Image (tube, grey):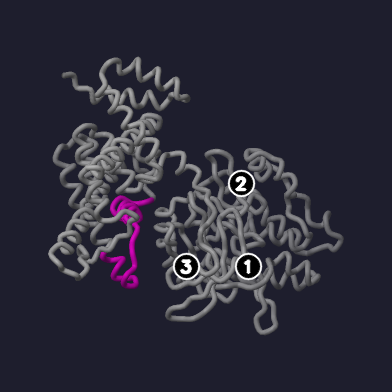
Amino acid sequence: MNDTRADVKAIFLEALDCKQAEELVCFLQRACGSDSALRSRVEELLRAHRDAGAFLGGTESQEATRDEPIAECPGTVIGPYKLLEQIGEGGFGIVFMAEQQELIHRKVALKILKAGMDTKQVTARFEAERQALALMDHPNIAKVLDAGQTGSGRPYFVMDLVKGPPITECCDEAKLPIRERLELFLSVCQAVQHAHQKGIIHRDLKPSNIMVTLHDGMPLVKVIDFGIAKALGQQLTDKTLYTGFAQMIGTPLYMSPEQALNNADVDTRSDIYSLGVLLYELLTGTTPFVKERFKEASYDEIRRIIREEEPAKPSTRHDDPVQLAAEQCSCDSWKPSSRPGRAC
Amino acid sequence: MSDVTRILSAIEQGDPQAADQLLPLVYNELRRLAAQKLAQEKPGQTLQATALVHEAYLRLVGAEREQRWESRGHFFAAAAEAMRRILINRARDKKRAKRSGDRRRVDLDRIEIALDTSDEQLIELDEALTRLAVEDAEAARLVNLRFFAGLTLKDAAAALGLALRTAERQWAYARAWLYARLRRDHAD
């Protein structure tokens, strides 16, 4: 008797390509002929294929569209944390306010990253960064307290809970004059300086990562999400743009040219660039490159704009002459070597 | 260069003995990692098997170095095999303990690893997989890499040196084969 194992496999695989029942029946008749044992074996496999569902993790297409909504919701307990309410959302996932219930009772922010991110790599990278992050101790930096995986395998980060608006919103709402804005900005610089001295680059400085909270009645800047960008590696963060295979960390509006070039040559000066953009926005109310342009531009076009175009000088956008405008422009120089070397 | 990296190079150069050296190293590292994690964290904490495999990779081979997929392929094949043995041994021990009336939970070297699959299912799967390996070794290797080392289909294809399309078809066949087998065993 012929060894029909190879035949079974070949026929099975070809049968998968049949789109309609009639097509399949015809095909099986042709392929199996009068060999009923062969035919019944192939049919057994086809039935198994149809019924297998999530067996062994499912088919490849199921894995590819792993964009299911996050299952965690208020009341869910993850490790020692109990989720209380959702306080934010972005392309990266969801942020909850949570309560730590063991050791210390306190409220924290718990950020769950969306599925589809390579959990093992993200977590492993974050572990490596965690040691360095633990060395940071600065009043203007929100600490990352913990990290782990939820029951469903998604990475999560636990951070100091920071209650307050992003810095740009805060300045606008309170109609802060230039001097006050600059003072807040200075705190941001001090925070970033501290991190740089510990060897940590933020990589994703933007208003939504710079919050202003009230402490003893005084505004206090808190920079959040240190270490997240690096842990995520090539993955997406909030509001990033990506087309096909190329992925970017950081928000294009705040991204330095070398980051836009996808250059591995990213160092502290990339943070400086982002600070420059922030300063521009604090002073003028708009970013050097206007959002609308980026929305319509393609990925390559955006990179080109960041690299090649000179933004309008702040003084042309704002009536008040600002003495720091010159320094600000040098922050946004496209060559890292032309930028101020230190945040402060 | 780490021991493992040296062994991987040797395997690539065709050294027949090198492959045998790899498995025990990887196996030990996995067990060590699991025990270490448990020592650090709260009791009852469970670990993701595939996270362990990836962490073992980072520790033994390193993250920053450019690793060719052939090297990675050998590593993950060994890791998948090691992980499979750890899990199956544990499942068998627990089954034996239950049968002999030993109520105490048996933790293999204090390794408690989270899986969606029950012990029974694991043992059955292992047996079915062993049979598949006889008929179609590559299909079985693919299942190992995906299920025990947690590789995506794309990465598993690279590890085995297959085109993605070929791997997709192998995967469809392997799943169907195993499912049919398990279903038949249950019917008997």
**Residue carrying label 2:** A241
Residue B47 within the segment the image draws in magenta: yes
| Residue A208, image x, y percentages | 65, 62
Depicted A129 relative to depicted A241: above or below: below
Q: Which three-letter amino acid code belongs to the residue tagged 2?
A: Leu
Q: Subunit of mark 1?
A: A
Q: Which three-letter amino acid code belongs to the residue tagged 3?
A: Leu
Q: Magenta residues, as a range?
A: B35-63
Q: Earlier in the sequence, mark 1 or mark 2?
A: 1
Q: Secondary structure beneath disc 2? A: loop
Q: Which three-letter amino acid code belongs to the residue tagged 1?
A: Cys
**Circle number at residue A199:** none
Q: Earlier in the sequence, mark 1 or mark 3?
A: 3
| Residue B152, image x, y percentages | 39, 43
**Residue carrying label 1:** A189
| Front: mark 1 or 2 | 2
- Residue for point 28% across, 41% down: B183
**Residue carrying label 3:** A133
Q: Is residue B106 left or right of residue A16?
A: left
